[in-house]
Amino acid sequence: EDIQSRSRLTDLLRPDLRGQSAYGAPQLPVAVALNTNESSYSVPDDVVEAITARVAQVAPDLNRYPDREFVALRTALAGYLQIATGVELSPEQLWAGNGSNEVLSHIVQAFGGPGRVALGFTPAYSMHPIISRGAGTGWVDGLRNATGADYDVDAELAVQQVREHRPDIVFLCSPNNPTGTAIGLDIVEAVYDALPDGIVVVDEAYAEFARPGTRSALTLLPGRERLVVTRTMSKAFAFAGVRLGYLAADPELTQLLRLVRLPYHLSSVTQAVAEAALEHAGTMLSMVEDIKATRDELAAVTGQLGLKPVPSDANFVLVGGFADAAAAWQVLLDRGVLVRDVGIPNHLRITAGTPQETQTVLRVLRESIEDGS
Ligand code: PMP
């Protein structure tokens, strides 16, 4: 009966959604969860106090809708980006949502849709195609380079694919999930110039973890009205549970996103909590250097174990060289360590957690290699 009603409903589903799979990183109760690139560090006590006080402040007014324009939050986000990147931005250039997934969805709803096409360079963030298709937008899986020997984006090939498909939206992910590497701004510029009629989105969810010398695409915003840079508080800010993602773009572009956002999409509680955390940005970000060190260790030691880590600018490492990635994933899980099988043959993606978690995952990997499992 269950199956019957399910198949009836499938008949009623939008034809273009039939047969698609939902995003679904397993949420399993394990000792060491290194599968969704969260921060393993809890919110520090003094920030917990500030958050609690701020929630108490807004609680009596929860009978009212929130500030639909979240002006204070946009101002705080602009202030943070200026400190972090040196780029001066006005609050009118900022936009936010419940996670960067939501702001990505706003972009697609506004600039994609039926009859339109989005292009990304695969493998990249799996939600880019899911969000695009969810809004009825066609999706083109672009190639990162011609040989497939590594995950670097070849600027010439990127430009060629953009010219061929003339997409309405191009996604660049830098640092890239799941491969970890950042791309040079020359590639962003080349793609932007090759696409006179499209929106270029640079997803910088992991920007704070980039190795020295990496510049944010935020520096390219002046004079580029079709460029959008998205960021999140879920990763470096150790704030995934709050669901706060944001973007910076031309003020006119953020104005157009208001056509598709749901009214009052950011709750008063979300706004208050995010503002409190941004006031303590230094504390919230204090583990970033430790996480980068852990990431580098994860890469170095997996390399010594004979595996093939991909250089990373993020808070995770994509590790190749597994004879059977699904089997290795299960061996790790059986020993209480959850990592991510991103569907790239012979590879697993491992988030850089605490030093202790990292020692655990490295020990389990070493043991399973020694066991030949
Ligand atoms: N972009 C990238 C590249 C990501 O990896 C993620 C999270 N895995 C997101 C965006 C979305 O994160 P959030 O919605 O929590 O901001």
Image: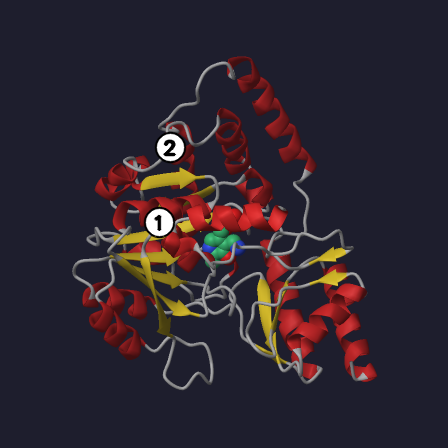
Residue at 30%, 73% (x, y): give it: 158
Q: Is residue 373 above or below residue 118?
A: below
Please rate how many residues cluster around mark 1, counting C-alpha atoms within 10 Å: few if below 14, some from 14 to 19, many from 20: some
Where in the figure is residue 263, as x and y percent of width and height? Answer: 37, 28
- Choose mark 2 or mark 1, whichever is in front: 1
Q: Is residue 278 above or below residue 199?
A: above
Residue 372 placement, left or right of 275: right
Where in the figure is residue 264, as x and y percent of width and height? Answer: 40, 27
Determine the CA span between mark 2 and mark 1: 15 Å
Q: Which of the labelled discs sits on residue 151, or is there none? A: none
Where in the figure is residue 181, as x and y percent of width and height? Answer: 47, 69
Please rate how many residues cluster around mark 2, counting C-alpha atoms within 10 Å: few if below 14, some from 14 to 19, many from 20: few
N-term-proximal mark, 2 vs 1: 1
- Residue identified by numbered label 2: 262
Q: The residue under label 1 is which amino acid type?
A: Ala
Evaluate whether residue 203 shows in this view: yes
- Image quadrant holding the C terminus, namely bottom right
For this rendering, which residue is in front, 7 or 169?
7
Where in the figure is residue 120, as x and y percent of width and height? Answer: 36, 65
Corner quadrant of residue 217: bottom left
Residue 7 placement, left or right of 89: right
Residue at 29%, 50% (x, y): give it: 113
Corner quadrant of residue 43: top right
Q: Is residue 370 above or below residue 14?
A: below
Evaluate whether residue 239 shows in this view: no
Where disc 2 sits, the SS reads loop
Q: The residue under label 2 is which amino acid type?
A: Leu
Q: Which of the labelled discs sits on residue 135, or is there none? A: 1
